[in-house]
Image (tube, rainbow, N blue to C red):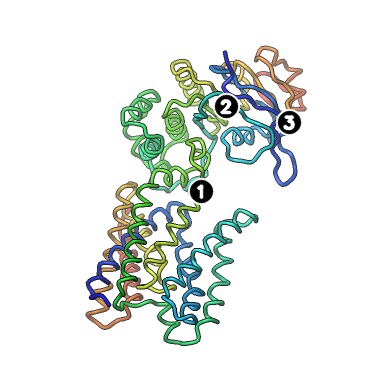
Amino acid sequence: MLSPAYSILLAMVAAAAAGLVGAFALMKRTILAGDVMSHIAIPGLGLAVVWKINPLVGGGLTLLLGIVLIARIEHRTRLSTEAAIGVMFASSVAIGALLIHSNEALIDALFGGFGQLSAGEFAFGMVASLVVIVAIWVMRNTLIIALFSPELAASTGIVVNRADLYFLLIFGLSILSSLRFLGALLAGSLIILPASAARQLTDTLGRFLAVSTILSVLAMAAGLWLSARYALAFGPTVVVVASGLFVLSLLRRR
Amino acid sequence: MPDIATISHLTVSYEGTPVLKDLSFAIEAGSTLAIVGPNGSGKSTLLRALLGMIPYEGTITWAGPRAIGYVPQKIDADRRLPVNVRNLLAAKAGVLALTASDIDKVIGAVGLDARVLDTPVGQLSGGEFQRGLLAFAILGHPRLLLLDEPTASIDHMGQDHLYEMIHRLQEDAGMTVVLVSHDLNVVQRYATRVLGVSTGEIAVATPRDPLTTEVLEGLYGWPTSRTGVAPPNA
């Protein structure tokens, strides 16, 4: 097991990735998908308990499967992304709860925790978070045009369906990198809350992306300190701090 | 002039019902082709097929690269987006590997000032927003400019101003224009050819001059003059 310093480093990088993804998800009006998509990992976490494999592998597999299914349900049926994600969400939570028999394992799966990481977990989380940050940076122009107007994107030569699928995959990867710390119920929170707070604070695109990322890291850091200082549950503390930042953002006069 | 695109037997269906049926025509380089026809006749669908956004039967053959600029009649984007015209121009320049001076040129050509460039798109007036979209469309020197009722959301003065600007840009840059418009005055003034679509089939494909009252009546199905389309109960 690695020293806690590695967990702290990974938690910060994962939070930065979530804040950045959240800013784009908010602009795409798919921000609630963050909350719902993290639940799709629950059956995988259940399978990981049953098969005694790493929870991230199990969660990652069902998350990936879920994303592919969402894309196909959306493509093949008349359902919107929202409805397709809703269908997956409703089924996943029930399947996961059936698979996970131990209450302790269920709590861990749902709410995460700040444990020591194995070298493999650290490497995976780090690579996943960095891939998210780099991919968003590389795709930023495509994403901005596509979220503004699919028609303008098509006129610019962007294949909108492909861009949407890539974003969904980046989104899933970001959830996965927060899953270890925040659990399936809360992993979406760092996508939703910092971006929503940042949106209150600025009308400028560059600042919005930066503030969302910074608030997410700030919530993670403050949550980490508070949970250690007052022996609180780690995941919920981070999310309560992020909620507090959102409430503070509402005080700003617009 | 050579053709920049040849459309052969184009059929587009939504859930089994053809919206456009067996359309064949060519887009001549440097021309302004106006597409006219009643609501629901498939004009916007035709533009979406040209953009490659929807599946179709038949062929659309481009002579040379397919470089398209597009100005829609409206954008469904969230009006509260923290995105301004400058962000959109920079994003397109990023995708097409253009330079800052390319952006400056279109800003100058369309006459966008710093306030219009830096205000979130949702807070711009209809005319300002459409000029921003026009700048976005012409960035990167498209060979074909598709305009779908580009002045639908702006007042008369603004409409004239925008069409004059488009006309000037077209002449300066040698662009080809495909224009969907209900305003037959505009069609008369700027179009070099007219394509009339009526319930999915071509009714007219002519130079603009023979666009007589009779031809228009045949297309729209009710008395229509060059100065406007007036449905029976309007």
Chain letter of the residue beneath label 2 in the structure image: B
Read off the residue under disc 2.
B62
Q: Amino acid at mark 1?
A: Arg
Secondary structure under the numbered disc 3 in the rendered image: strand
In three-dimensional space, the C-alpha distance between marks 2 and 3, rounded to whole angstroms, equals 18 Å
- The subunit letter for the residue under badge 1 reads A
Mark 3 is on which residue type?
Asp
Q: Residue B22: give its label.
A: 3
Give the Cα distance between marks 2 and 1: 23 Å
Which residue is located at x 23 percent, y 75 percent?
Answer: A3
Q: Are marks 3 and 1 in contact (CB under 8 Å)?
A: no
User: Of helix, strand and loop, which one carries label 1?
Assistant: helix
Q: Position of residue B4 (x, y in %)?
A: 56, 22
Decide if residue A45 is on the left or right side of residue A72. left
What SS does tag 2 mark?
A: strand
Instruction: Please say if B152 is above or below A83.
Output: above
Q: Residue at x 57, y 25 (%)?
A: B178
Within 10 Å of disc 2 (Cα), the crowding (few <14, some 14-19, many 20+) is some
Q: Circle 1 sits on which residue?
A: A162
